[in-house]
Amino acid sequence: MSIYLDNAATSHPKPPQVYAAVLDVMQNIGASPGRGGYGLALEASRLLFETREALASFFGAADSSRIIFTHNATESLNLAVRGTLQSGDHVITSSMEHNSLLRPLFMLQKQGVELTVVPANVEGLLDPEDVRRALRPSTRLVALAHVSNVTGGIQPVAEIAAIASKAGALLLLDAAQSAGCLPIDMQALGIDLLAAPGHKGLLGPQGTGLLAVAPHVRLCPLLAGGTGSSSDQDLQPEGFPEGFEAGTHNLPGIAGLKAGVAFLAATGVETVGEREREHGNYLRERLAQLPGCCLYGPDNPEKRVGLLSLTMAGCDPAALSFMLDREYGIAVRAGLHCAPRAHRTIGSYPQGTLRISPGWFTTNVELDLCCTALATIIQKGSP
Ligand SMILES: Cc1ncc(COP(=O)(O)O)c(C=O)c1O
């Protein structure tokens, strides 16, 4: 038996409709969208269109043709920052970011983009006033994660978006840990670029992701290549979406993503988020009673999603996770979670934390087994 509590890395299991959709496309469509005039290729194109429409409606995006399919959140973030920033531009980010955002920004810094990393507080939360103070006349972009993948803390996005917009800067939201568990309305929140994986909270297969781009944003493509359109031209076509989707799509993955989003829309993102938050709160309450347990992230439950990070005094998080897996079949993640600066911010650098991330399909029995297993490991003596 295995218990999967690493949904912040990728969600598992998926709703049964997702598996069925992937298989159906592979068995019954198989063709590539936009690459032929025959019936199966047209069916494939229709599936792409319907998925863009579903995602635009799910995220309150103004124009579904500006939903770009990618292969993960990392590709979406790279496209967003490299597609909007030029040498001499200034970009603001935070100390809580994932390497998927930080590393492309540090690469751009080497090419002449100016970068400010605004520190968050010890709970991992940003003060919007610090973002305002970091603004410069050349600030082109403010880029940050909606929810930290280390603490589960929710950033004050609406306030920061208003500050960015007033200064004439774009807001890029990394929704890797919020898409599917917090309602996101791009237009209401003032988000100009929204990067999301399809394989985490959206419950789609691995190898899926998206970048949603507001109508006023000018974007340069990351990749050039075959688009199935304007084939006589030497240069990459400029139009949305095909100019940004060079090469063959992951159609089975996209079909699964469509099914995942349909499941969320039918169940309700609030319902899913609330259940995951209850799981997280329950784990926090139980684990806080263990001797030497230190929980990270905001104290206020309103400012957290379901994932949580902890350390146990005198215990190596990697050894704890190894024991949980080997002795109890429980999958959790230990270490820096690709966000080293977040750990420096909250005080868990360099050993990192043990991260437990329940999902929609996690049961109360699994949570109890995890708590009991951790208590037993601690009781037996530090691993
Ligand atoms: C906050 C954050 N941003 C970006 C990513 C990268 O996502 P992906 O693995 O889909 O590239 C992750 C993945 O854990 C994440 O947690």
Image (tube, rainbow, N blue to C red):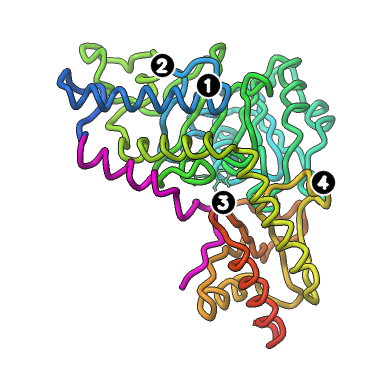
Q: Secondary structure at mark 3?
A: loop
Foreground residue, 166 or 111?
166
Q: Is mark 1 within 8 Å of ligand 1?
A: no
Comes first in the chain, label 4 or label 2: 4
Counting other residues with Cα less than 10 Å from the Cα at mark 1, is it few (<14), some (14-19), or many (20 or more)? many
Query: Residue 360 shows which numbered tag?
Result: 3
Q: Quadrant of residue 346?
A: bottom right
- Label 4 vs label 3, nearer the camera: 3
Comes first in the chain, label 1 or label 4: 4
Query: Residue 121 shows which numbered tag?
Result: 4
Residue holding disc 2 = 240
- Please name the residue shown 58% across and 71% down the image: 321
Q: Are marks 2 and 1 in contact (CB under 8 Å)?
A: yes
Gap between marks 4 and 2 measured at Cα: 39 Å
- Label 4 vs label 2, nearer the camera: 2
Residue 313 on image: x %, y %: 76, 74
- Looking at the rendered structure, the kind of residue marked 1 is Val
- Looking at the rendered structure, the kind of residue marked 3 is Trp
Above or below, comparing residue 260 to residue 66 in the picture: below
**Which region shows up in magenta?**
1-28
- Label 1 vs label 4, nearer the camera: 1
Query: Residue 327 shows which numbered tag?
Result: none
Residue holding disc 1 = 213
Quadrant for the C terminus, please.
bottom right
Gap between marks 4 and 3 measured at Cα: 29 Å
Gap between marks 3 and 2 measured at Cα: 34 Å
